[in-house]
Image: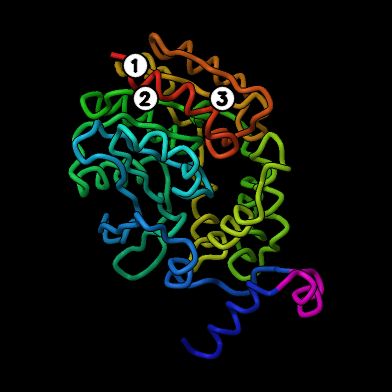
């Protein structure tokens, strides 16, 4: 590693007081972290990589190889680590696959033949999830998706009903809504222009607190992970390209009525990112869907209180 890379990493690891002295306002994201550095910090014992659409996609494959397959899909700005607390309970019986969606986590952005970062939208995520499932030889699985991952999950159940055994939507996206303020920032050209070389850490920390119902539940290691992944090479530019294309008005949610998979809708009642009223909307549109609400939990209930979510997930998955 060259001297500049070492100095960059040292700046990101330095205590807040030192950074305040250096930059005047704490960590501001002047540098990006390489994928190699991120892998050293955040790869898991079960981490694997597979080529998907000319990108190396980070995923894990845990539990009995002959168990029923579950695919866990995280939301915007998150990574497969968001499922960490719930995997041990699931992996006792099921084969559990989780992946880092592009442009997040250790996967990072997709790039075209000239090396330019691709813009992710619903259509490109369809290509991405279909290609990933093919790459890991999964023809049929139960899909568990949170937020953006929930949108990808129910869209898959609509497009390819034979590929989805059961469907779990956790604070899922899909109905028309205003974007959360911390995402909507990237709709503004000055933010998109400046974010790749300057994005203060306090914004990322504030967004992380905002997805929890109780911000006191967020450990420092979780803050550090979210910050690191936003400071990953190419990630901020990719987010700036992606956010203006997040147009939920283009989604035909009436197609939810065609979902054949048994469906469980889980929702944190203190979700500040997607209105809790959308939980009832999903339940009414999807035939036979069940709904569980969590008082006190926010947008990522499976990360905030995994035991509570597992208590509802396991009976649903086990039911015939």
Instruction: Tell me: residue 28, above or below residue 48.
Output: below
Which corner quadrant holds the C terminus?
A: top left
Q: Position of residue 71 (x, y in %)?
A: 33, 37
- The residue wearing badge 1 is 262
Q: Is residue 86 left or right of residue 138?
A: right
Q: Does the magenta run of residues contain 43?
A: no
**Image spot of residue 99 (x, y percent):** 37, 48
| Residue at 55% across, 72% down | 32
Q: CA distance from mark 2 to mark 3?
A: 14 Å
Left or right, 285 with respect to 19, comes to: left
Dividing the picture into quadrants, the one containing residue 138 is: top left
Element at badge 1? Answer: loop
Q: Is residue 24 left or right of residue 318?
A: right
The residue beneath circle 3 is 267
Residue highlighted by disc 2: 167
Residue 80: where, in percent of width, then height?
A: 44, 48
Q: Residues within 10 Å of mark 3 (few under 14, many from 20)?
A: many
Q: Mark 1 and 2 residues: CB-CB less than 8 Å, in contact?
A: yes
Badge 2 or badge 3: first in the primary sequence = 2
Magenta segment main secondary structure = helix
Give SS at disc 2: strand
Magenta stretch containing residue 16, yes or no? Answer: yes
Identify the residue shown where x is 40% and y is 32%.
144
Q: Quadrant of residue 277?
A: top right
Separation of marks 3 and 1 at Cα, in angstroms: 17 Å
Can residue 152 be seen at all in this image of the molecule?
A: yes
Magenta residue span: 15-26
């Amino acid at each position: 590693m060259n001297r500049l890379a070492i100095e960059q990493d040292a700046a990101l690891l330095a205590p807040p007081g030192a950074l305040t002295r250096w930059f005047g306002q704490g960590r501001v994201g002047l540098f990006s972290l390489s994928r190699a550095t991120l892998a050293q910090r955040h790869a898991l014992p079960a981490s694997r990589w597979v080529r998907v659409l000319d990108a190396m996609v980070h995923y894990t494959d845990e539990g009995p190889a002959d168990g029923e397959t579950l695919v866990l899909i995280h939301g915007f700005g998150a990574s497969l680590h968001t499922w960490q607390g719930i995997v041990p309970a699931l992996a006792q019986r099921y084969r559990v696959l989780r992946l880092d969606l592009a442009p997040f986590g250790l996967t990072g952005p997709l790039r075209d033949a000239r090396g330019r970062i691709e813009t992710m939208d619903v259509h490109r995520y369809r290509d991405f999830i279909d290609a990933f499932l093919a790459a890991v030889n999964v023809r049929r699985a139960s899909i568990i998706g949170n937020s953006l991952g929930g949108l990808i999950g129910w869209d898959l159940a609509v497009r390819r009903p034979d590929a989805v055994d059961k469907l779990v939507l956790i604070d899922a996206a899909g109905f028309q809504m205003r974007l959360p303020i911390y995402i909507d920032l990237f709709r503004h050209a000055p933010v998109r222009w400046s974010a790749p070389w300057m994005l203060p850490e306090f914004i990322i920390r504030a967004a992380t607190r905002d997805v929890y119902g109780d911000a006191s539940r967020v450990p420092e290691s979780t803050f550090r992970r979210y910050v690191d992944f936003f400071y990953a090479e190419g990630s901020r530019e990719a987010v700036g390209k992606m956010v203006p294309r997040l147009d939920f008005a283009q989604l035909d949610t009436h197609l939810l009525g065609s979902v054949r998979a048994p469906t469980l809708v889980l929702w944190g009642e203190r979700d500040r990112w997607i209105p809790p009223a959308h939980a009832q909307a999903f339940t009414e549109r999807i035939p036979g869907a069940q709904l569980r609400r969590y008082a006190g939990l926010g947008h990522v209930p499976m990360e905030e209180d995994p035991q509570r979510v597992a208590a509802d997930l396991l009976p649903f998955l086990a039911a015939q």
